[in-house]
Structures are given as structure tokens and as C-alpha cells.
Image (cartoon, rainbow, N blue to C red):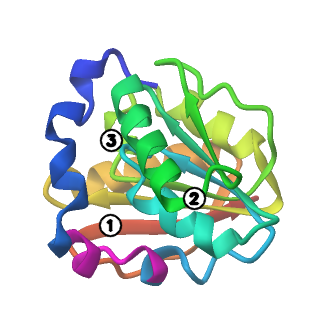
Amino acid sequence: MVNSSTDVCSYKRAWALDIWIRKYMQNPYKIVGNYIKKGHTVLDLGCGTGFFSLAMAEMVGEKGKVISVDIQEEMLQMLRDKIERAGLKSRIIPHKSQPDKIGISEMVDFALAFYMVHEVPDKRSFLSEVTSHLKPDGRLLIVEPKIHVSKPDFDSTLKVAQSAGLKQISEPKILFSRAALLIKA
């Protein structure tokens, strides 16, 4: 849900999404592990090359699934290659979204928007669509980089989330980030 692929983290810098230090500083198991259970359906918004998607696929187990959404076909192709190598084809569904619409039909238990909401020009429409796909007890974790997103800007996003039918239930501590865990109001 961005204006063009020039507004997002380019696939040309995708190598930086998988460096070893990131696995230490942004460990997916520590960040989302408490929110995902075996059998869940989860949504990885702006999945890139699948840094979180692959870990979440392990968390949901054989009966769960991860819907990995990105607007860049190149990122999704890198993800498909990783899925194949990891043997997780039955658990991860790569989905190319449109710049203004996610375009999925599934209901999800958990959605992750990691370092991407600040790239969305129409946050209200985006967050309303995410909310419409959350199951009644579904949760959304929004994480934004402190270096790009000021506290007032993050608070503004949370107000938009509230107007889209979400309620903040906690403020997880994630290194160098601003984060909010939300649930349907």
C-alpha cells in the first residue's frame, strides 16, 4: 500500500535483511514467539525476503500457515527460493499485494507489520484492511524503526489504528524500535 516500489526498501538491498547481526538484534522467536501458536494462520506484511516468515512458519507448525505479503515480486521470488530450500512450501503462501490493497481473503490469528507502516501513504485504509482480516481475538504487532519514525509520528499511527477498530494492549520492548501490540476493539 505504497505509491511505488521506489517508496519501499528495494530488493537491491535485500542482502541487508538477512545479515547475522539482525538475527541477534531482531530475533523473530523473541519478538513474535509469544503471539503465535501451532495451527495459527499468520500474516507477514511487507515480508521482504522472509526474515520473519520462515521463523513464523516453524512456530505455526504443520497445520498452520503464514501468508507472506509484499508489493515487490523480486522480494517474493527470494522468499520462494528460501521456502524451497527450507522445505516449508506447505506452510508459507507468498502473496503479491497491490500498492493500495493487500488483497487476501483469509482471516488471521496474528499479523506482523515490521518496519513498514511508515512506508504506507494511506495508513487508515491499510489498517482498516488488516483489521478486517483479524479473527475476533486476533492481534497485530506494529514495529517501526526509531531512526525513521518519531514518537509523535508513531503515536499518530496508533490513533489511526484506533480509528480503524484496533486497541493497544501492550508496548513490547524491541531494540531500536517503537512497538505496539493491538487487538480488535
Decide which of tag 3 and tag 1 comes sooner along the chain: 3
Give the residue displayed 13% in from the left and 57% down from the top: 147
Question: In the image, 136: left or right of 182?
Answer: right
Question: In the figure, 4 relative to 77: above or below?
Answer: above
**In the rendered structure, which segment of residues is drawn in magenta?**
22-29
Report the front residue among 109 and 176. 109
In the image, residue 48 lies at what x, y percent? 37, 43
Q: For label 1, count other residues whose C-alpha is less than 10 Å away and answer few (under 14), some (14-19) or many (20+).
A: many
Q: Nearer the viewer, mark 2 or mark 1?
A: 2
What amino acid does circle 1 point to?
Arg
Q: CA distance from mark 2 to mark 3?
A: 32 Å
What amino acid does circle 2 point to?
Gly
Q: Secondary structure at mark 2?
A: loop
Q: Secondary structure at mark 3?
A: helix
Residue 158 appears anywhere in the view: no
Q: Is residue 7 magenta?
A: no
In the image, residue 100 lies at what x, y percent? 52, 18
- The residue at which mark 1 appears reads as 178
| Residue 2 marker | none
Q: CA distance from mark 2 to mark 1?
A: 33 Å
- The residue at which mark 3 appears reads as 118
Question: In the image, 8: left or right of 182?
Answer: left
Question: In the image, 95: left or right of 15?
Answer: right
Question: In the figure, 23 relative to 106: above or below?
Answer: below
Decide which of tag 2 and tag 3 comes sooner along the chain: 2
Q: For label 3, count other residues whose C-alpha is less than 10 Å away and answer few (under 14), some (14-19) or many (20+).
A: many
Give the residue displayed 38% in from the left and 59% down from the top: 51
- Which quarter of the figure has residue 139? bottom right
- The residue at which mark 2 appears reads as 87
Q: CA distance from mark 3 to mark 1?
A: 12 Å
Question: In the figure, 4 relative to 51: above or below?
Answer: above
